[in-house]
């Protein structure tokens, strides 16, 4: 195994962990065989080799390779994940974003399913518009049958995605878009009513300008059958909008994309109309287009005066922008595309998407509050600079290598020649920001300090390094303070922290949703494509607040909006550090006051009833029998491991005995589920639309499903409503399916900062 410790790379333990698990090359036994330096060298060498196509000498190519290598190892810029994973390796697929057409025929639908599977296998994410499919109940002319509508076919795409593991390191992600004027729009908006459908899709409604005008005037608008192009009925725009708002408030979906605005900035309108985006919504693409993304770490572009941050280092930023555009344009050449049509469409427009990360870190170092007018002005200034310099470099490359083939039919045809139809996109940077050791995208801080993967009796803290440095320099650092901050996530309300420090160490929940929108709009002013950002709401936010955010986003020129209300997902982690500590204190006090207390398991009655559930695991079929007592409380659990024996069978039996002992000792079922769920083994399985990580995980899910029937508990009265309703200040959306850590909502995506698991980047 290659030694992960590095001598000149400044990588955090989290970065090393993520690199080892998801990026570094492994042998057939799964052992890591390259160090981070090797990975960056592999990528730099592969991308620089393109220069040989343009009559560069070997010395010039080596010099460019070293420039690319320095760019990445200094954490000034990182390309999207597939490039880091696959450059210089057999797969060679380097793009993250794809859009595939879905036309109104069975052939087109299943061609798209097949192509999506190939893309997911290669490590990319896909976007689809289902707006061209005829509505549910429509007559199919060729068979005289009845159309089942877009939603039924989306489940086919969802199932196919479930079955494909992306390049061994990433699982497929999709964007599904339906225009607001499609006859099935109400069913689409409600598609994720209970979070059990289409879990491999992000959903967005394609909002038209016509709809927004009808909404403004409180009028009706037409629903258009895409097959006949005729109006089939009219709906009140306000009623549809209210439904969208209500569902977004409930669980964050669907999002909205302003589809006409995206087409307003389509660089090649004569080539085709934009109907969909990549999975996180920031990259509008034509059918069969792909895009290569990369992000500049703004925290590495700060000018210092006597060891103090004094402003943006514009000269260094200019150099980074030029090299990054050069890098991304080379990726288009060296890329191995999953389909010939994708290669042709991508090379015809040569779109790249250069974005940023580390924005919150830059503001903190400069002492600028995230939710201030000064921050919005700087955002506009920084992005305008990146946009201008990226166009200069694209023009330079056009002089050397030629314009993109569709240049003469583009909106730029009477302007300066360009190599790339687009140059800027702000994407989520989940795992990239972990590698770079910076804040994600243009998001505020997730938390100043938080507990990472708390094991029994062990607390592992993640503390913002800038805050740690300031706290130690100014003398208010203490372990007790970090305990307090980790419980709250935010500094607000903590008297031990000086007010001037609180002012610029702002977390996502310290900021109003409208301030989130204003920041997104400030960057969007100078971005070719779109901006991926999560607009965070507190758990107590109202649907009216979501509505206000949508209106502000549309008014300020945003191209889409993704909202997330804390605690709105069923699987969200709701217990706080405070709740845990209070429970522990109560238990300790109880033990001290009654040292002779012993727990005696309830006796088994003569007659007992229950059910047996089949759970598919990586070790084989596991049969889980759960019995309840005469009062309907869960009482005992038995397991049988199909035809398998040995270690798996004996461990499952042991878990069953311990679970039975716990149930008979008045331990609540959800506590057992919490402790068994997410435990991983080397051989996971997928069944019933979900991942079974291990036999322990399967048993937890069996208990969970049984307990859901009538809200069965354990009859000991310890299930407190207030514990269920406790609110976590940090935006969590459940346990990571890979490691069990906390998953955050940010940048329109979800990412685990423990192991790097992400849905979309």
Image (cartoon, helix red, strand yellow):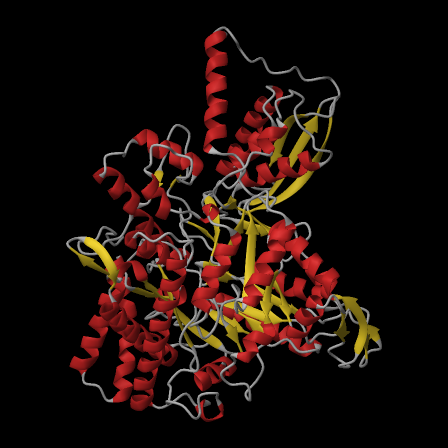
Q: Which of these two is toward me, 451 or 160?
A: 451
Residue 90, position in %: x, y? 37, 70
Q: Residue at horizontal 33%, vertical 36%?
A: 497
Residue 69, position in %: x, y? 24, 67
Please give left or right for residue 639 compared with residue 422 in the image: right
Q: Quadrant of residue 216?
A: bottom right
- Which quarter of the figure is the C terminus placed in? bottom left
Residue 392, position in %: x, y? 32, 81
Q: Is residue 362 above or below residue 618?
A: below
Q: Residue at horizontal 49%, vertical 83%?
A: 267
Q: Which of these two is toward me, 273 or 681?
A: 273
Q: Residue at horizontal 20%, vertical 71%?
A: 66
Q: Is residue 163 visible?
A: no
Q: Residue furthest right?
A: 144
Q: Is residue 118 above or below residue 268?
A: above
Please give left or right for residue 217 compared with residue 95 in the image: right
Q: Residue at horizontal 63%, vertical 58%?
A: 198
Residue 408, position in %: x, y? 46, 93
Q: Which of these two is toward me, 551 or 705?
A: 551
Q: Is residue 396 visible?
A: yes
Q: Is residue 443 above or below residue 256?
A: above
């Amino acid at each position: 195994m290659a030694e992960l410790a590095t001598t000149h790379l400044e990588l955090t333990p989290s970065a090393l962990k993520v690199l080892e698990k998801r990026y570094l090359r492994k042998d057939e036994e799964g052992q890591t065989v390259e160090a981070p330096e090797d990975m960056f060298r592999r990528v730099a060498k592969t991308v620089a080799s393109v220069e040989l196509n343009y009559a560069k000498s070997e010395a010039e190519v080596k010099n460019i390779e070293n420039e690319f290598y320095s760019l990445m190892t200094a954490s000034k810029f990182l390309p999207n994940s597939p490039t880091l994973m696959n450059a210089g390796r057999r797969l060679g697929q380097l793009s993250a974003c794809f859009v595939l057409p879905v036309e109104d025929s069975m052939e087109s639908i299943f061609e798209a399913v097949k192509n999506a599977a190939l893309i997911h296998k290669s490590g990319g994410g896909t976007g689809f518009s289902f707006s061209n499919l005829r509505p549910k109940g429509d007559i199919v002319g060729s068979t005289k049958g009845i159309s089942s509508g877009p939603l039924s076919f989306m489940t086919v795409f969802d199932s196919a995605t479930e079955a494909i593991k992306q390049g061994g390191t990433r699982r497929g992600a999709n964007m599904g878009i339906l225009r607001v004027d499609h006859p099935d729009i109400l069913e689409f908006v409600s598609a994720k009513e209970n979070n059990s459908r289409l879990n491999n899709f992000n959903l967005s409604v394609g909002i038209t300008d016509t709809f927004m005008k009808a909404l403004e005037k409180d009028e009706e608008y037409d629903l258009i059958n895409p097959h006949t192009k005729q109006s089939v009925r009219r709906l009140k725009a306000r009623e549809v909008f209210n439904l969208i708002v209500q569902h977004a408030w409930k669980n964050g979906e669907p999002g909205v994309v302003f589809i006409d605005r995206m087409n307003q900035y389509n660089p090649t309108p004569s080539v085709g109309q934009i109907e969909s985006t990549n999975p996180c919504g920031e990259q509008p693409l034509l059918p069969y287009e792909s895009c290569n993304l990369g992000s500049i770490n703004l925290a590495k572009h700060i000018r210092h005066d006597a060891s103090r941050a004094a402003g943006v280092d514009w000269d260094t930023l200019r150099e980074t922008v030029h090299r990054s555009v050069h890098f991304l344009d080379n990726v288009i050449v060296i890329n191995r595309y999953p389909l010939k049509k994708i290669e042709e469409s991508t090379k015809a427009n040569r779109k790249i998407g250069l974005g940023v990360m580390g924005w919150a870190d830059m503001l903190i170092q400069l002492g600028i509050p995230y939710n201030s007018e000064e921050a919005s002005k700087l955002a506009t200034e920084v992005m305008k600079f990146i946009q201008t310099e990226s166009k200069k470099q694209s023009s330079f490359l056009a002089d050397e290598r030629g314009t993109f083939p569709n240049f003469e039919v583009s909106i730029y045809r009477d302007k300066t020649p360009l190599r790339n139809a687009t140059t800027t996109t702000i994407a989520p940077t989940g795992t990239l920001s972990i590698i770079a050791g910076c804040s994600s995208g243009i998001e505020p801080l997730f938390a100043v300090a938080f507990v990472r993967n708390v094991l029994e009796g062990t607390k592992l803290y993640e503390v913002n390094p800038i805050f740690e440095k300031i706290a130690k320099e100014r003398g208010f650092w203490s372990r007790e303070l970090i305990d307090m901050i980790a419980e709250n996530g935010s500094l607000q309300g903590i008297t031990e922290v000086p007010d001037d420090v609180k002012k610029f160490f702002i977390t996502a929940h310290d900021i109003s949703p409208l301030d989130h929108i204003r920041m997104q709009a400030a960057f969007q002013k100078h971005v070719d494509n779109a901006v991926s950002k999560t607009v965070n709401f507190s758990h107590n936010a109202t649907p009216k607040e979501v509505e206000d955010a949508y209106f502000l986003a549309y008014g300020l020129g945003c191209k889409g909006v993704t909202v997330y209300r804390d605690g709105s997902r069923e699987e969200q982690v709701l217990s706080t550090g405070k709740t845990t500590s209070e429970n522990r204190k109560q238990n300790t006090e109880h033990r001290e006051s009654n040292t002779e207390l012993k727990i005696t398991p309830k006796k088994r009655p003569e007659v007992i009833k229950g059910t047996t559930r089949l759970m598919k695991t990586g070790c084989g079929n596991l049969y889980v029998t759960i019995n309840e007592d005469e009062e309907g409380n869960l009482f005992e659990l038995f397991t049988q491991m199909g035809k398998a024996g040995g270690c798996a069978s004996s461990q499952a039996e042991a878990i069953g005995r311990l679970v039975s002992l716990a149930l008979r000792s008045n331990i609540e079922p959800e506590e057992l589920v919490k402790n068994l769920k997410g435990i991983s083994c080397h051989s996971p399985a997928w069944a019933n639309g979900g991942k079974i990580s291990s036999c322990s995980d399967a048993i937890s899910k069996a208990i969970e499903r049984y307990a859901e029937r009538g809200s069965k508990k354990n009859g000991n009265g310890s299930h407190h409503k207030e514990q269920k309703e406790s609110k976590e200040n940090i935006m969590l959306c459940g346990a990571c399916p890979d490691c069990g850590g906390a998953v955050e909502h940010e940048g329109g995506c979800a990412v685990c900062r423990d192991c790097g698991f992400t849905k979309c980047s």
